[in-house]
Image (cartoon, rainbow, N blue to C red):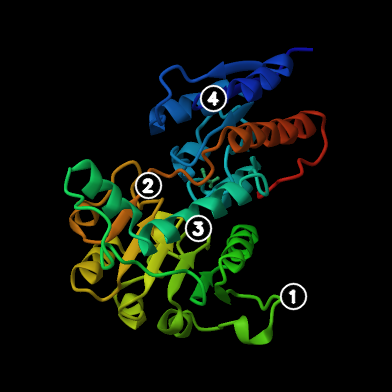
Amino acid sequence: MTRPRILLTRRWPEAAEARLAERYDLTVSPDNKPLGADALAAAMRDYDALCPSASDRLPRAVIETPGRRVRIIANYGVGYDHIDIDAAREAGVVVTNTPGVLTDATADIAVMLMLMTMRRALEGERELRAGAWRGWRPTHLLGHSLEGKLLGLVGFGRIARATAKRAEAFGMRIAYHSRHVAEDMPAEAYHASLAELAAKADVLSLHAPGGTETRHMIDAALLARMPAHAVLINTARGSLVDEPALAATLTDGGIAAAGLDVYAEEPKVHPALFDAPNIVLLPHLGSATVETRIAMGMKVADNLDRFFAGEAPPDRVA
Ligand code: DGY
C-alpha cells in the first residue's frame, strides 16, 4: 500500500519528525517559514495530510483549492483560529489539534509574565546591563508581590485552570469570566460580566480562543474599566487585544503594566507596543519547551495514525 503523503509546514523536533517518517511519505517544508497562500494551495493538491502551525493561514480559498487531495489538516498546536473551520467542515476536510500537552508550559509563561511585570524583572535586567545599577537600596525598583492579589482569568479552560493552580501557590485569589460556571469553583469566583471582572482584578490574564467572537474583547472601553495598578497578561491570541488601545492605556497610566506572548499579526508586533512603557514582549513562547513540542508532534501523529487507520482521530475539531 502506498504511504500517505504528509507535509509539515515547519521543522518539528527530531523525535516527532522521526515518528512520522516511519509510517508516512514525509516532506518537511525546507525553509522553515510560513507558507504563503499559493504554496498552501499547492500543498492541498499534492498531499494527503497537511500539518500547519499557528503561523500558517488557511482561509476558505485555500481549503477549497480545486483538485484538493488533502483529507486531514492535523494542526501542530491547540489554537486553530488560523484555519477556516466552517470551510473545512463544508468541504469534508477533517481538522485536528493538540489539546492538553501544552497546558502546563503555557501556564508557566503566564505566571512568568506576571512575575516579570509585577517584580520589574526586565527593567532591572536592562538597568544592570546598561551599567546603571547603583547597588542595593531600600527603594530601588520596588514591584508588587503576587500574594493576596486577585487574578482574573478570562476564559476558564485547561490553561486558565493550570494558571490558577500556579497562582494559588503564590497566594493569589482567583476569579474568572467564562460562558459557563465551573461547578468545582466557589460561586463568587464566577463573573458573567467581563467588565465587572476587569474592574476588580489586580491581574487580568487572557485564556480565550482567537476568532471573530473574541476579537478585541480587550478594547479601550474595557481597559478603562481596569484599575490603574492592574496588569494585563496575554498568552492566548493577539487578536483578543486592541493593541494600539493597550499601548495608549499604558502610556496614559490607565493600567500599570502588560505582559504579552502573542500578537495580532505575528511575527509583526504593532509599533505602538514597542513605544509603550511597562510592557514585557515575548515571541510566542507559550509552548516552547523541548518536552512540549515533542508531545505536540506525537499528538499530531496519534491523530494521523487513527485517521489513516479509518478511525476517528481523538482531537477532531472539524
Ligand atoms: C497553540 O498551540 O495554539 C500555541 O499558541 C502554539 O501554536
Q: Amino acid at mark 3?
A: Val
Residue drawn at x 28%, y 67% is: 138
- Residue topped by disc 2: 282
Residue drawn at x 54%, y 43% is: 287
Q: Amino acid at mark 1?
A: Asp
Q: Tell which tag, 4 or 3, sits nearer the viewer.
A: 3
**Which sits earlier in the primary sequence, circle 2 or circle 3?**
3
> Tag 4, which secondary structure?
helix
Q: Amino acid at mark 4?
A: Arg
**Nearer to us in this view, 318 or 220:** 220
Q: Is residue 108 left or right of residue 219?
A: right
- Residue topped by disc 1: 184
* Coordinates of residue 22 in the picture (x, y in percent): 72, 15
> Distance of mark 1 from mark 3, alpha carbons?
22 Å
**Which sits earlier in the primary sequence, circle 4 or circle 1?**
4
**Nearer to us in this view, 302 or 235:** 235
Q: In this picture, is 253 found above or below 16?
A: below
**Nearer to us in this view, 213 or 208:** 208
**Which sits earlier in the primary sequence, circle 4 or circle 3?**
4
* Coordinates of residue 44 in the picture (x, y in percent): 54, 29
The disc placed on residue 45 is: 4
Q: Is residue 193 left or right of residue 123?
A: right
> Distance of mark 4 from mark 3, alpha carbons?
43 Å
Q: Quadrant of the N terminus?
A: top right
Q: Tell which tag, 4 or 1, sits nearer the viewer.
A: 1
Assess whether mark 2 and mark 4 are in contact (beta carbons under 8 angstroms).
no
**Nearer to us in this view, 236 or 34:** 236
**Which sits earlier in the primary sequence, circle 1 or circle 3?**
3
